[in-house]
Amino acid sequence: MTPIPWDPLPGAHIYVDESTAGDYLLMGAVIASANAPQMRSVMRGLLLPGSRSLHMRKEQKRAATILSTVVGLGPKVAIFRISSSIPALDARRAGVHAVAEMACQLRADRVVFDTIESMAARDRAWVIEGAHLAGERTPPFSYHHQRRHEEPLLWIPDAVGWAWARGGQHRREVERVCYMVDL
């Protein structure tokens, strides 16, 4: 994998979501652990009454507000793009490897994946493989899955990935916080 052009951020947390609209995208939002509580609060503030989580597929009318809020928080979001010609399972494996390698490179403390029950065991194995590819015997970070309503910071990669996949003005709104890696 091409190294991410960001300085190491020891203690960072990486929140991971996917988009399958077109090419397979796996987004990893890198957030300094010290900033996480305040960013969670801001993201929760975007919820509509009665909502448990934010998902861009359902928030198109509020897209501009949500995207400007996300960009204003200043996360760094790596977008790992795998061609739609690659089978979905192979694409996810490549993306999870890349996230694990990035976590090693940045010296992150924690990686949190949006829960996809059928993928959890595979993701765990692929994180270990990705750490090996980065030269680590074992992952030097914790990793687990959470449901989107349990972790508001998972909404950040969802929003950025949605905007990137949509293209046009939506993509332009998030470009300054993104780094694209073709796998």
Image (tube, grey):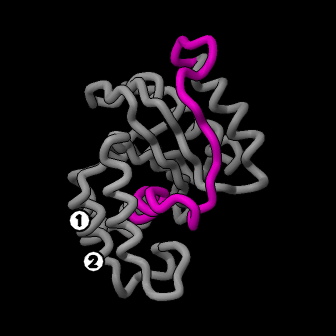
Q: Is residue 34 above or below residue 58?
A: above
| Residue 172 place in picture, x, y as percent | 23, 63
The residue at the point 52 percent across, 17 percent down is: 134
Q: Is residue 28 left or right of residue 148?
A: left
Q: Is residue 158 magenta?
A: yes
Q: Is residue 94 above or below residue 119?
A: above
Q: Is residue 142 left or right of residue 38?
A: right
Camera-side residue of 21 and 137 = 137
The label number, if any, that marks residue 64 in the structure image: 2
Labelled pair 2, 1 in contact (Cβ < 8 Å): yes
Q: Is residue 148 above or below residue 177?
A: below
| Residue 150 place in picture, x, y as percent | 57, 62
Q: Which residues are magenta?
A: 133-159
| Residue 166 place in picture, x, y as percent | 39, 69
The label number, if any, that marks residue 173 in the structure image: 1
| Residue 126 place in picture, x, y as percent | 67, 32
Q: CA distance from mark 2 to mark 1?
A: 8 Å
Camera-side residue of 80 and 71 = 71
Residue type pointed to by label 2: Ala
Q: Evaluate whether residue 129 shows in this view.
A: yes
Residue type pointed to by label 1: Glu
| Corner quadrant of residue 157 | bottom left
- Tell me if mark 2 has few (under 14), some (14-19) or many (20+) residues whose alpha carbon lies within 10 angstroms of its own: some
The residue at the point 21 percent across, 61 percent down is: 72
